[in-house]
């Protein structure tokens, strides 16, 4: 299968293709050639995003070709390769395939577009275990989760671990431990909440903890549910990013093509999030991650069969969205 062979060819450049590195450049050169072979007219914008256009090209599909350090062969690359395959199959459709620069370190390329399309569709490996656990090859992303981060501090009283009776202690870490469980309880429906870091003072084995600071990472699919989650947890966010909804004709087309596909919220950011936030009607198709959702590592995996159905679905979706150059009416 050609898409898989191309993913191998990109991976052979290197498992590390940082944004604007010679390795990312080489990946763009390969995609440039494949775009031409698919009958697309190739060009680049000022920041180096690569476009393969046909006709008016108001409908775009693509992703990125850079990787994290020692990344996998599917993250980003799959979306570019799949879009080229689709463009090759529907040769009359006016569309563009795009390879954005430096998604992993920004995103940088998709944030600096000087022109926006009327519609954008991105195919991406799920990078998580949900589709694998549902035993389904494809999922439709309905939103990229919003996120709030902050910290909560618990104050106690430092005392001797060997002489202070349990009943007389003010143990900040015991309070923090209850909070960790509380945070977990608050993450209902499609919300997620995590305490990933604890700072314990004085942090000695034989001293009852005096002060503990617990980090909080809260994510939810809508602004309202994020507000509710923050309120339920009871913390003051120091950083917040609103959720971004997939919408409009691209989402409707994808839902029509894959009528019974599960719908997911992406917990990670993507180029699609950037375009949707800029007001472009956007859709995103997730392809099942094998190996338990391993991501940003060489174990990242999607099967040939799943990629084949993803390319079929993308082709049909773009066919519905893109005017045909030969329609002639
Ligand atoms: Zn990616």
Image (tube, helix red, strand yellow):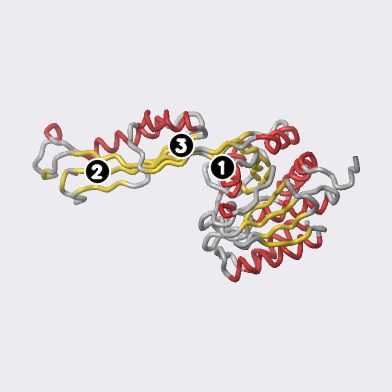
For label 1, the SS is helix
Mark 3 or mark 2, earlier in chain: 3
Mark 2 burial class by Cα count in 10 Å: few <14, some 14-19, many 20+: many
Whether residues under marks 1 and 3 lie with C-beta atoms below 8 angstroms apart, the answer is no
Q: Residue at x 15, y 35 (%)?
A: 166
- Name the mark on residue 192: 3
Mark 1 burial class by Cα count in 10 Å: few <14, some 14-19, many 20+: some
Q: Which mark's residue is nearer the viewer, 1 or 3?
A: 1
Mark 2 or mark 1, earlier in chain: 2
Label 1 to label 3: alpha-carbon separation: 21 Å
Residue named by callout 1: 277
Q: Camera-side residue: 207 or 151?
A: 151
Where does residue 182 sit, x and y in percent of width and height?
A: 35, 31
Mark 1 or mark 3, earlier in chain: 3
Using the rendered view, name the quadrant where residue 74 is placed. Answer: bottom right
Where does residue 287 sit, x and y in percent of width and height?
A: 65, 45
In this rendering, is residue 209 above or below 30? above
Where does residue 83 sit, x and y in percent of width and height?
A: 73, 51
For label 2, the SS is strand
Image quarter where the N terminus lies is: bottom right
Q: Is mark 2 within 8 Å of ligand 1?
A: no
Asked if residue 219 can be seen in this view, the reply is: yes
Q: Residue furthest bottom?
A: 22
In this rendering, would 71 be left or right of 12?
A: left
């Amino acid at each position: 299968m050609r898409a898989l062979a191309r993913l191998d060819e990109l991976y052979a450049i290197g498992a590390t293709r940082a944004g604007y590195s010679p390795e990312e450049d080489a990946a763009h050169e390969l995609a440039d050639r494949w775009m031409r072979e698919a009958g697309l007219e190739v060009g680049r914008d000022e920041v180096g995003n690569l476009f393969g256009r046909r006709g008016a090209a108001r409908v775009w599909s693509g992703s990125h070709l850079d990787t994290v350090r020692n990344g996998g062969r599917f993250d980003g690359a799959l979306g570019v390769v799949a879009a080229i395959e689709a463009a090759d199959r529907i040769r009359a459709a006016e569309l563009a395939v795009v390879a954005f620069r430096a998604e992993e370190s920004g995103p940088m390329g998709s944030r600096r577009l000087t022109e926006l399309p009327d519609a954008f569709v991105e195919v991406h490996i799920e990078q998580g275990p949900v589709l694998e656990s549902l035993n389904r090859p494809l999922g439709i992303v309905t939103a990229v989760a919003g996120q709030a981060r902050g910290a909560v501090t618990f104050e106690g009283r430092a005392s001797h671990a060997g002489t202070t009776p349990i009943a007389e202690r003010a143990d900040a870490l015991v309070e923090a431990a209850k909070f960790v469980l509380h945070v977990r309880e608050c993450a209902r429906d499609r919300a997620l909440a995590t305490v990933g870091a604890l700072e314990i003072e004085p942090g000695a084995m034989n001293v009852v903890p005096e002060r503990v600071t617990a980090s909080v990472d809260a994510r939810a699919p809508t602004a309202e549910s994020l507000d509710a989650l923050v309120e339920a947890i009871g913390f003051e966010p120091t950083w917040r990013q609103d959720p971004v909804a997939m919408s409009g004709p691209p989402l409707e087309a994808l839902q029509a093509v894959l009528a019974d596909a599960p719908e997911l919220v992406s917990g990670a950011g993507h180029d699609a999030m950037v375009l949707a936030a800029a007001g472009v009607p956007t859709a995103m198709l997730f392809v099942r991650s094998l190996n338990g959702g391993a991501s940003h590592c060489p174990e990242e995996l999607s099967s040939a069969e799943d990629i084949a159905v993803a390319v079929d679905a993308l082709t049909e979706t773009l066919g519905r969205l893109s005017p045909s150059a030969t329609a002639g009416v």
